[in-house]
Image (cartoon, rainbow, N blue to C red):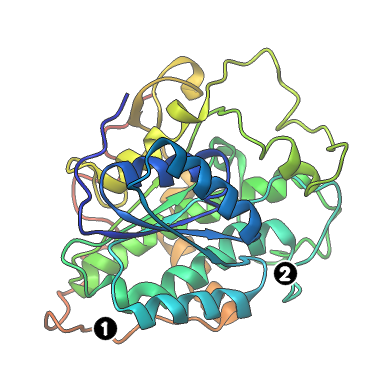
């Protein structure tokens, strides 16, 4: 089991911390000494999760705050609260929704999966950058998915308004977008001279309520789909499934722009290893265009190019990640 390094004195935000990988990440970060802000859509569920963690570790530093990633006003309100607190060392973009039975929309009119899984976390990340950049060694870690490998970014119909809706392909698009967010943030950090590490992870096939309640948004009978109806595949519990996320979030060996996942059978289970980055996620021009479109859609934009640490460094020659980490530790 991955041992989280000492996190004493650090303040952490974990989205979707009321269950699954989010709750497990919150527990293990708190056990390592971090003060964990459990960012959840339903505070009552967050309080129950906090009580479960405290029952195992009464000294855990935890607080529950509400955020609805499907509502940009809620994202801004949450971010404003964190900014007012003046400290944040780590943002863990973990929350997500998977394969709703039909096309649904967020409070702002975006397709639910693209809005909740990508645009909400994007807006949260950008709005929290000022306080993150004030930390000594800040990190942003974003949860992607193995389904990103068959995802594509369709700029002509990001919201699935023209095509016949596909829950699985929409989910894959949103998780590819998450991976591209993490990698492009690493590019921007390099270009602007920020001491910010951005990385991504995926949990393989980890048994959580995302495959059941997530697919139906809490309805009694979840819609069965390719993503939740493959019982013959190897799977694992959240204790193992969260480890790529925790490694990216805390390991001194984690690299900027890197992608981590299970390294065992079919890359679905097992100990953490560098994950194969899909070809489409390596397209820096598409990532930059997606970032610009996300800024337009959410109204969240980057802080000034230079921060209190001084002028930004010159951009990398080709606009991509630094040499040696374009696909760190690629395994087939």
Res. 188 image quadrant: bottom left
Residue in the image at 67% along x and 48% along y: 171
Residue behind mark 1: 305
6 or 289: nearer the viewer: 6
Q: Is residue 117 visible?
A: yes
**Image quadrant occupied by the C terminus:** top left
Answer few, some or many: residues within 10 Å of disc 2's Cα (few below 14, many 20 plus, some between 14 and 19).
Answer: many
- C-alpha distance separating marks 2 and 1: 29 Å
Callouts 2 and 1 close, C-beta under 8 Å: no
Please, which residue is most extreme toward the bottom here? 304
Q: Is residue 155 above or below residue 24?
A: below
Q: Nearer the viewer, residue 224 or 68?
A: 68
Q: Vertical placement of 225 versus 168: above or below?
A: above
Q: Quadrant of the N terminus?
A: top left
Residue 315, position in %: x, y? Answer: 21, 71
Q: Callout 1 environment at 10 Å: few (<14), some (14 to 19), or many (20+)?
A: some
SS at mark 1 in the image: loop
Query: Which percent across, then down, holds residue 81?
Result: 45, 79
Disc 2 on helix, strand or loop? loop
Q: Does 324 sit left or right of 147 as displayed?
A: left
- Give the mark nearer the N terminus: 2 vs 1: 2
Nearer to me, 37 or 187: 37
Q: In the figure, is residue 159 to the left or right of 18?
A: right
Task: Please name the residue that numbered disc 2 is placed on.
Answer: 110
Question: Looking at the image, is 51 positioned above or below residue 301?
Answer: above
x then y, percent, for residue 254:
24, 43
Number of dots carrying numbers? 2
Residue at 57% over, 67% down: 66
Residue sitting at x 74%, y 68%: 106
Res. 43 mark:
none
- Would you say residue 278 is visible in this rendering? no
């Amino acid at each position: 089991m991955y041992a989280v390094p000492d996190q004493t004195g650090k303040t952490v935000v974990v989205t979707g911390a009321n269950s699954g990988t989010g709750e497990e990440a919150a527990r293990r970060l708190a056990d390592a000494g971090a003060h964990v802000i459990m960012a959840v859509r339903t505070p009552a569920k967050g309080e129950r999760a906090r009580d479960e963690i405290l029952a195992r570790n009464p000294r855990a530093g935890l607080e529950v705050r509400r955020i609805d990633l499907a509502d940009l006003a809620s994202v801004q309100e949450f971010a404003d609260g964190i900014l007012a607190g003046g400290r944040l060392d780590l943002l863990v973009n973990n929350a997500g929704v998977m394969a709703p039975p039909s096309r649904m929309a967020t409070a702002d009119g975006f397709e639910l999966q693209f809005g909740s899984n990508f645009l909400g976390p994007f807006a949260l990340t950008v709005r929290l950058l000022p306080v993150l950049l004030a930390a000594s060694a800040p990190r942003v870690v974003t949860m992607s998915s193995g389904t990103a490998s068959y995802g594509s970014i369709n700029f002509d119909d990001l919201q699935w308004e023209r095509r016949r809706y596909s829950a699985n392909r929409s989910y894959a698009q949103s998780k590819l977008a998450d991976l591209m967010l993490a990698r492009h943030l690493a590019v921007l950090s390099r270009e602007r001279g920020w001491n910010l590490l951005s990385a991504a992870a995926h949990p393989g096939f980890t048994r959580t309520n995302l495959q059941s309640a997530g697919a139906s948004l809490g309805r009694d009978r979840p819609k069965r789909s390719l993503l939740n109806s493959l019982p013959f595949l190897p799977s694992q519990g959240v204790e193992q499934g969260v480890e790529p996320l925790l490694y990216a979030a805390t390991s001194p060996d984690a690299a900027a722009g890197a992608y981590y996942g299970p390294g065992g059978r079919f890359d679905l289970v097992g100990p953490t290893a560098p994950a194969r980055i899909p070809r489409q996620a390596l397209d820096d021009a598409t990532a930059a265009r997606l970032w610009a479109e996300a800024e337009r859609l959410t109204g969240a934009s980057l802080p000034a190019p230079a921060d209190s640490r001084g002028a930004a460094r010159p951009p990398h020659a080709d606009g991509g990640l630094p040499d040696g980490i374009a696909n760190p530790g690629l395994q087939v």
